[in-house]
Image (tube, rainbow, N blue to C red):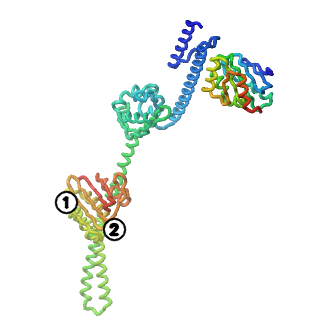
Amino acid sequence: MKELLEETTSQNIYWDSENKIVHGVLIANLTTLEDAIENIDAQERIKNKMNREKTRVLIDMSSVSEISKEARNYFSNERTASIQRATALYINSVVGRVIGNFFMGINKPLTPTKIFTDKKAAIKWLHAYKDE
Amino acid sequence: MNKYKDKHRINYILDKLERIAHLDFSGRLKINAITDEIDALSVGVNMLSEEIEFSLREKEKTAQKQVNLLQQLVDNSPLGSMVVHIENRSDITSLKIVIINDACEDALGIIKENIIGKTILQAFPLLYDDYPVIIDGLKKAIEGAELTLNRVELNSSNSLPSYFNVKICPLVNDYIFLSFENITKRNEVERKLKKVENSILNSIIFSQENTRKEVSKKLHDGLAQTLFGLKFHMEYINKNVRNSKDKELKESVKVVREYIERSIAEIKSLALDLMPISLVEEGLSASIRNHINDSEYKYNVQLESNINDEKIDYDIRIVMFRAISGILDKASEYTKVKKIKVQLLNGASVSCKIEIWGGFNIEVNNDGEIVEEEFKVSEKRINLMGGSVYSVYDKNLGLTTILMKVSL
């Protein structure tokens, strides 16, 4: 059961009550720093609403072909790490794979992060991290 | 898949990569909706371009911060200071001047606006040929060595030579710091001070010698003659009281007579010590020989002389005599001294070699110059005459060799 809690310029963010994870679906490219901040602000609101210390996050990157350097840097900073317990990146294209690998290899996020091409596997991996 | 279109898309990627290689980060590769492998490659190239551009900008910012910091340090330095950047490590002439302070402008007689941003060869065309020592220093700094070049002569714009202590110090990020301390004025002031000091010292020493000479003469001609007169009278009184029955009177006359004789001997000795008459009448070697005989040293002294006193000025005789007798007297305080050999020679100069066996060591500095205070005066006197004194101690032999030389 997924409930849409936040809609930003580039992302629809749901609360998956069954798996107790935040499910973000990117609907547009992230070309500015503001895009990234808007998304993390929204994730923080959900975290607070769900009364969690940190949340497990699944990001669906299927529709994305660009995430700017500033946005990538923001997603790998301490503020993002203070909100996300662990982040699974779901991709289903070669473009998504390049972006994901670049993010992991160059930007090196502080939160535990992994790329998946299978959503179930991604959720299973997130369950390895405590929900609190 | 449209092969024609794909070829174009790949050509765009190659163009973009070529531009990145030339550090041109303008333009982004267009991503089609297809999201195929070529799109993936384009996305990767775009991100790579962003990352490289960002890293370079960050590096430039850091470098600029360092230059600003250096600029502040250099501007506040009272020394003439300059910072150069190593553009090409294998080409010394590629060093580019990035910072110069006002003190450096004054020191080198240059206008900084004219040379900032230029290579050192453009700014100083004569540097390579005329100042190889600085070029060598810069080469060493490129290799990471820090060094100081003392008294480098640089011709300033007013054509008068100036002397500098130059420090060359490698910094981080391929920068080299140079400072130029103009020591021309300091040297000149030090030279003048030395001249005044020598002149004062000279006056003191020779007025001291004149006073000694005067007192010696007064003792010899005045007091000693008076005592001789008294002695003569006492001889007369002694003859007259010889047959007297007054034993006390006879004893008193005898005592007074002895006092007079002892006083005459002491005054003679004192007068000789103040100014050996033999130094004037017989010369340096005779005076030293007399001094050795009179001093009754406990050690064996061997004097070898081959000098012609007529050629030696009186002032030089005094100076040499005081120095040699001073060393012999000082050595007598050391019980271990067994033997001293003094050799006097003269030609174009009068020189003296003193060899002392028995572990008598005079404190000297690394250049063999005497630093022991008691001998400094003797050394100073000889220096004032344009001469020199050196001392060497051979620990194994327990032999101290002192060499003194004054040009005639």
Q: Secondary structure at mark 2?
A: loop
Q: Does B336 sit left or right of A96 as displayed?
A: left
Give yes or no for contact between labels 1 and 2 (Cβ–Cβ under 8 Å).
no
**Image x and y of residue B386, in percent:** 29, 51
Q: Is residue B111 in view from this perspective?
A: no
Q: Is residue B243 in view from this perspective?
A: yes
In space, the residues marked 1 and 2 are separated at their CA atoms by 29 Å
Q: Does B154 sit left or right of B277 as displayed?
A: right
Q: Amino acid at mark 1?
A: Asn
Mark 1 neighbour density, 10 Å: few (under 14) some (14–19) many (20 or more): few
* Location of residue B373 with respect to B267 vertically, above or below: above
Name the residue at 40% across, 29% down. B92
The residue tagged 2 is B336
Quadrant of the rendering where the N terminus of chain B is positioned: top right
User: In the drawing, what numbered circle is on residue B164?
Assistant: none
The residue tagged 1 is B306
Q: Amino acid at mark 2?
A: Lys
Parent chain of label 2: B
